[in-house]
Image (spheres, rainbow, N blue to C red):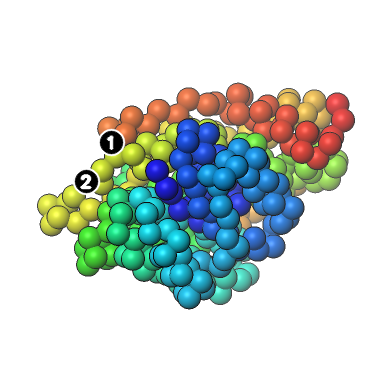
Amino acid sequence: MKILITGAAGFIGAALAKKLLERGDEVVGVDNLNDYYDVKLKQARLARLRETGKSAFSFSQINIADKDAILALADTCKDAELVVNFAAQAGVRYSIVNPFAYAESNVMGFIVMLELARRLPRLRQFVYASSSSVYGGNAKIPFSIEDPVEKPISVYAATKRSDELLAYSYAHLHKIPCTGLRFFTVYGPWGRPDMAAYLFTSKILAGTPLPVYNYGKMRRDFTYIDDAIAGTIGAMERPVSASDQGVQSEIFNIGNSRTEMLTDYIGEIEKALGQKAVLELLPMQPGDVPETYADIKASQEAFGYAPKTTISEGIPRFVDWYKKYHSVQG
């Protein structure tokens, strides 16, 4: 099967591409390789994909908001059966600093990708990354796909919710089956440097203060990368159900279905490193939430989603990768 993946040099996109190549699929990767974080890490992920896929993997460096360049893929990808749009500007806090980047990638880029999907005659499904951030300040725990999501508290969350609405409109207007995946704090080997596991590990090793917001009173549904990829593939492989109005647009939570204290997460990193953290307790950041927790009942019923990796298993795997990647001794 031929599959187009945007964000192919990103954390989740690269992990998905590798898994698909290993099982024999052909993958066309797209990424703009921006410098939001170290481009060398993105290039290293791409090198792994080239080694894994050989001729079954091809890559184009394109910004998904570049309408002409993306729509030109309609010819080279005319036999693609799946589009997985994981390209996006990530980060809640950065969206306060640079909202224009989110409008370009997460809104304009998303529309461009949907327009590409319209032009692919063999397309069976358009899968895209949403985020647990769309739940905003939801006080009901755990977060369910049935919960209201009309009040995003960050620009990032607002753009991700707009993607869900745009996907629904294209499913209605152009009969494109769409599946949105609300990811909950994905971590693991080859992860992003701005995410908690990577950031905390680097600071603990350096002996520098580790910023802990809301004075440590934070809980997160930490999802190990292998579980996130298993859920993504499960969603990709099933036909999208139609609503009573005949619209094929669905949304699922991809989380670990357990909520952990941030201090316990840090404790697992300390244990794996054999080194204590220096904590800098700080107030809550704008746009942040004190707790996330995924209700995965719909995902379980639809495609048998069953996350199984605890932080006590996942964190040592991440730390082991981090030390190898950065040539850390000990």
Q: Say above or below: 79 vs 51.
A: below
| SS at badge 2 | loop
Q: Position of residue 19 (x, y in %)?
A: 52, 36
| Mark 2: amino acid | Ser
Q: Work out whether residue 136 or residue 244 is closer to the camera in this orientation and state it.
A: 244
Residue in the picture at 21% in, 46% down: 241
Marks 1/2 in contact by CB < 8 Å: the verdict is yes
Callout 2 crowding tier (Cα within 10 Å): few <14, some 14–19, many ≥20: some
Q: Quadrant of residue 113?
A: bottom left
Q: Which residue is mark 2?
A: 241
Between disc 1 and disc 2, whose residue precedes? Answer: 2
| SS at badge 1 | helix
Q: Position of residue 263 (x, y in %)?
A: 64, 35
Residue in the picture at 68% in, 46% down: 47
Residue in the picture at 27% in, 32% down: 301
Q: Which residue is mark 1?
A: 302
**Residue situated furthest left in the rendering:** 244
Residue in the picture at 45% in, 61% down: 76
Q: Position of residue 121 (x, y in %)?
A: 30, 59
Q: Work out whether residue 171 or residue 218 is closer to the camera in this orientation and state it.
A: 171
Instruction: Kindly tell me whether residue 303 is visible in this rendering.
Output: yes
